[in-house]
Amino acid sequence: MPYQIFSHVLPSASLGTQRIIKAHHFGVQGARPKVYLQAGLHADEWPGFLLLNTLLKHLKKADEAGLIQGEIVIVPVANPIGLAQNFHGYVPGRFAFSDGGGNFNRNWPQIGQQVAKRIQSSITGDVEENKVLVREAIREELKQLPDMTELQGMKKTLLALSMDADEVLDLHCSGEAMLHGYLPQEFEDYFKPLLGLLGAKVGLSELETGAASFDETNVGVWRELKGHYAHLIPWGCRSMTIELRGENDISDEVAEHDAKALLEYLVLRGVVHGEVSQGEVTQDDSSKRDDSAVVYYPLDAMDLVKAPCAGIVCYSKQIGDEVEAGEVIGEVVNLMEDDVTTSRYPLVARTNGVLFARYQRRLVMCGESVAKIAGREHLAYREIGRLFED
């Protein structure tokens, strides 16, 4: 099948309005492996937009050369609802203003139990047959999801495009950050080559966070089924959230670097035939790949450093710096203090690790998370389900 673009119309939120999601399809529908990529689910996180735009140019060349062996689906703009939140040039884009509100990357519909019931009388001793069976059950359950509202329609559309994929890559970014990834613990070895190609040094892994995020939802069905049927159900989908550095790390040079890394990864997985050289696909040579710099940290060891008061934050530690528990990584200046000589309050690390992300805005509110430290030891005070409330 030649390269095609499909437009998916979302339910109209109000009279005279209509939003669409565009999906770019490469390869033959149903070919394996299938990889799904999207950007901008948090519509205030933009590096992924340019990255996927650049990757599409390379994939079009590969397609014209007949090098697409699997199936690739790319949604370069995943959240047109959030992008419409434009207030005098500022796009919040992280939380829905309707349908009960909430973070766009939380509380996605979970269909694992429904799929388990649907296949319980059909499961076989053949794992490949079971994989096909599960994917068909997923498609049928997705049809049952409500799509009355714009947000429901967006979630149903994105899941319909992604949930039968072998791999799902959801592109995000932080305020200021190193490139890093969030992924299930079971996939550390599997995704290490991708993180290495991208130049990441930090990966955060956990069995599951309880946030029902987009990437967890795609893999959650398979985790649910493996709990019922163990070795009879393989991992039919592997997913990861990739944080593409900071909000302002956007340039043609950065996008080209990351697009080349993704293209090389698609070659590694057999989705594209050949090897990438100067953005072009040639014969494969895996000997040049090096992921030795990638270090995994347990997600429940991540320290969210919070502002002790409202004010202006001044960091003394930089992104990528090693820190120790008890070390001061910056201060918040309380502008309402009468005595300016005692108006600075320390930001203190609670774990040993790496400062990998921090707030971009320097005006902070009391209790806001202003920095993230990838810790090496599990934190007794951490409630993993609350990690992603923001």
Image (cartoon, helix red, strand yellow):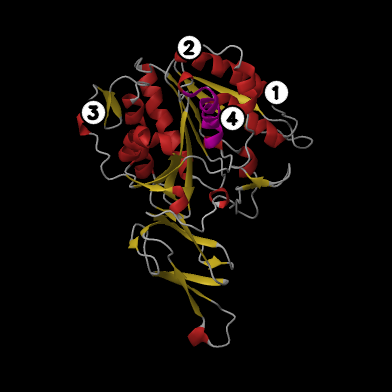
Q: Which residue is mark 2?
A: 125
Q: Is residue 70 magenta?
A: no
Q: Which residue is mark 4?
A: 158
**Which numbered mark, 4 or 2, is in the foreground of this view?**
2
- Any part of residue 56 in sight: yes
Crowding at dot 4, Cα within 10 Å, few <14 / some 14-19 / many 20+, comes out as: many
The first of marks 3 and 4 along the sequence is 4
Residue 144 picture quarter = top right
Q: Which residue is mark 1?
A: 144
Q: Secondary structure at mark 2?
A: loop
Q: Which residue is mark 3?
A: 286
On screen, residue 51 versus residue 261, left or right, reads right
Relative to 298, does residue 63 appear above or below in the rendering? Answer: above
Q: Residue furthest left?
A: 287
Magenta segment main secondary structure: helix
- Residue drawn at x 64%, y 48% is 95
Mark 2 and mark 3: Cα distance apart in space: 35 Å
The part of the chain drawn in magenta is 216-230
Mark 2 and mark 1: Cα distance apart in space: 28 Å
Instruction: Please state the total of marks drawn on the protein image.
Output: 4
Mark 3 and mark 1: Cα distance apart in space: 43 Å
Q: Report the amino acid beneath label 3.
A: Ser
- Residue drawn at x 74%, y 34% is 149
**Which numbered mark, 3 or 1, is in the foreground of this view?**
1
Percent of width and height locating residue 24: 50, 25
The first of marks 2 and 1 along the sequence is 2
